[in-house]
Image (cartoon, rainbow, N blue to C red):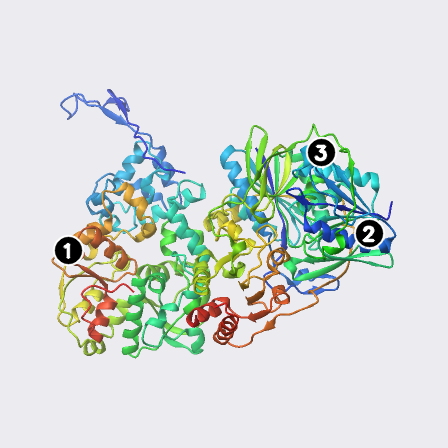
Amino acid sequence: MSKDILVVAEHFNGKIADVTFEMVGKARELAAGLGGKVVALVIGAGVEANDLASDATLQVNEPALTEFNPEAYARIVEAVVQEQAPRLVMFGWTSMGMDLAAWLSGRTGAPCAAYVRDLRLENGGLVISCQAYNGKLIAEVEPQGEMTIAACLAGSFPTEAGRGATAATSIPSPIALDSLRVRFVEAIQPPPGDVDITTQAKLVAVGRGIGGKENIELAEELAEKLGAVVAASRPVVDAGWLPRTRQVGKSGLKVKPKLYLMLGISGAPEHLEGMKDAELIIAINTDKKAPIFNVAHYGATADLFEVAEAMLELL
Amino acid sequence: MNIVVVLKHIPSVADELPVRGNQVDFDSVDFVLNEWDEQSLEQAALIKEALGGTVTAIGVDVIGELDNLLHLALAKGADRAVKIAADDAGADSHRQAKWLSEAIRPMAPDLVLVGVQASNDIDGQLGPLLAAYLDLPYIGVVSSIEVQDGTALMNKEFAGGFGARYSVRLPFVAGVQVAPKPPRYAPVSKIRQIAQTAKIEVLEPSGEADSGLVFRKVAPPVVSGHAEMIEGSPKEIAARLVALLKERGLA
Amino acid sequence: MTIQEQKAVVVEKQRVVVDGVDISGHWNRMFEQRTIFEYTPEQIEAIASIAGAESFAYCYQCAKCVPVCPVDVVGNYGPRKLYRYAQTGVNLMESPELWLCTTCANCLRVCPKEVNMVEIMPAVREQAILQGKFVPPELQQAFENTAKTGNPLGQPQRKRDAWIAKADVPVPIIKDLGRPVEVLWYVGSYPSYHPRGVDAACAAARIFTALGIDFAILGKEEKDDADSQRLAGEKGLFEMLAEYNIATFNKYEWKEMVVTGPHELNAFKNIYPRYGFNRPVVHYTTFLVRYLDQLKPLLKHPVRKRVTYHDPCYLGRHNGEYEAPRLLLQAIPGLELVEMGRNRQNGYCCGGGGGGMWMDSFTAKHTRMRLSEKRAMEAASTGAEVLAVACPFEVSRFEDAMKSTGNEHVGVLDILELLDRSMRGEEAAEHPQPS
């Protein structure tokens, strides 16, 4: 078993995604402590992969894998891991990483930590902080065994330390690609038509606390008075109360408005990923311990309906 | 189509989560159905409606109250309900996935649907673990599945409204993010009737797996920054907020 | 899922021998050879085997029910016909007819065999729901709304008592009052949320206050009685809400409950006792008529209108209250009460009962006109200027019906609103102002 760290890179439209730079930066810090190297694994051809601060970047130069294929990527990572026997394998806790990390754990028997917000070394051992239970609790875990898998929340580490100029080394696919059961068909573009919440200066965002579709109207009224547009957290969209185009967060859109007024959003890490850079964040939530209050600039522990209705009268 | 839907009974995050020792105090929290499992149930029901077949709902009974969830699943179109009687409130995803894989393998499913994630998936989600144990492909963050001639055409979501369409040869495991339609209404009459008549198959946990994670500590996040809290009645809060917004030219 | 008319299957036989006797004709009192029809009893047996629907099989086709059936008046229905359809192989469970009955109980009133549609329909509908048969989508929506928001309109629970801001008098909430009251007023979903229902609720609050009645409401704790959902087949939903409501009612000390709506009266007085609730409940008309002597001096302003009164099925036929509403109307100075041809025991249904309130589009597809339209035309033909009602379902139903039948000149007012007008002298409104 080596002391190296394998970072499984994520890319989109031919560019390495931010979460990868974040992980490489963190990996460098950990590798220094472990006395190992940072190896980045980029799967897919046509990806600009020469700007990482890794010690080595391996690129599987397969045109067929330029687009994410969960089965192929999983098998390739498994093969590379078997060959390199790293101390730590890092994924993003993203749509891609969520397909790969726990699967690799099941295959290899190596422990997996998800919702990872931080990793550090203590006496040569890893201590990982996981932001579980919708961000309400942080679990500090010590993975046992020689290899650990970590799926890291985007935005947990700065990207700068991960930027560099390591030239990628092309490697052939370690697995045969002709017997895959999963086939990429086509890319899906965001649906057009609805308002683009990413270009709005003001957003009134509603979460599960809004209770039901019948209450969306209240948020719409408040938004109208403020010259804002209504956005939502994932549960609201999944319940069908608002269209998907309004969703902020990891599986939705990243927004950076001047005002982000949050009604009944507790602040799950997936949501924070999409809005934490807003200029003014105001959160109203009945739960005084809601994690959102650690991120918001102003907060109030109150019934969102009563506050919103009172605001409507004043606006 | 032989569809298996996996239900995960998890601590509710609606209220405060008390901690005892280095874990959640499972005895003093409510357990609820993982919200994504409602989506996978709906997706299963939609496929069954389109193609026929059977839906088997299965879950690990971690606190002895899984029956309620299985009744709901039956009311929403599941044909068969199976619980793995574990009585282990802290059973992690690895352990549950191993038990589930042992129970599901003999069912020879065409499709296994799992909620894409759960808020207590500290050691990873059930779906990909299950797929690894069953030696099946896994594809998660799925927003629609259509099956035709032994192949599923499905949409997977990435961030920002982008996604991709995949075709997958059956069988496989899918992690459902959202069903094409909002979860259906289950008539209360039906749930109550099922509660009285349904036969739930009970299996003993079989197989062993371990997350390999030793919990050192579980605690609310250490607050680095905190919002400036506005106190007072809702009216006072509203007045303060409106003043604040006007001050900054935002209202 | 869709639902279609089913084809009748009739088997004609030229010659039939029963117990060795040829009954085909010639030898007996029939003068010529006749065709004998043979039917299969399967569909009838299938319905009658459902608990609660046994009396379906009692029918002997006398047809007394047909002319009094409000649905038959505007369509081709009537309980006798349902039996006949079943004889010819129609499966009621999969037929549109299952959803047309309003459980108005007029057929039961005349039926010599006591075929009880009020029990048959909920039982068979429940089976249809349980077996995943077609259920009108708009009805499903009302079920879902009730389950999720506590009212069939899908309005937020937190706004249940928002109407009190419009009442002009204080409306105490029992929880805030913190003491026993004489009267717990169960407002009901439509009076709480529907704009025209709110008008009646506000009127009631003013009348109770003027009479000095010690009353309170449940406010945000109040949820739908769910009786019409039960009659539409969602018994489980009804039971779930009954359990909640009974627990809520029993949290507080009060002597008598007054309800705005006849459906709530039916629920709390006749059905909730099966679930252990046995406290006194009265409809507001029954309650107010006790105060007639105190009320009369308050009715200072004449309401010079020709008024006809529509008997709500669940106040009249189901609960026997015909006179209190009339006494209240007659107490209003200047008001002239005229009767429609169908009144009291033979009152014509508005179409809103038994879940009909939430199946208007579906019913419209299977009838020539809405029941409410038929009734609106009857009311107009009396020359009345106002149709007075005593059920919160009815105001909006009849207002729509007056418009769609070209009778906008006939206003629709709850008795509460008429009393309130007489009390406060707001004569100006020829027609009710939409809130």
Residue type (three-letter) at the residue carrying disc 2: Gln
Question: Closer to the observer: label 2 or label 1?
Answer: 2
Q: How many marks?
A: 3
Q: Mark 1 — on which chain does it sit?
A: C
From the image, state whether disc 1 or disc 3 is nearer to you. 3
Residue C358 appears in the picture as rendered: yes
Q: Label 3 sits on what residue type? A: Glu
Q: Quadrant of residue C73?
A: top left
Chain under callout 3: A
Q: Is residue C348 visible?
A: no
Amino acid under disc 1: Ala
Query: In the shown orientation, is residue C407 left or right of residue B37?
Result: left
- Which mark identifies residue A62? 3
- Tell me the residue that label 2 is attached to: A144
Which of the two discs, 2 and 3, sits closer to the camera?
3
Name the element at disc 2: loop
Say which element carries label 3: loop
Q: Are marks 2 and 1 in contact (CB under 8 Å)?
A: no
Q: Quadrant of the N terminus of chain B?
A: top right
The residue beneath circle 1 is: C380
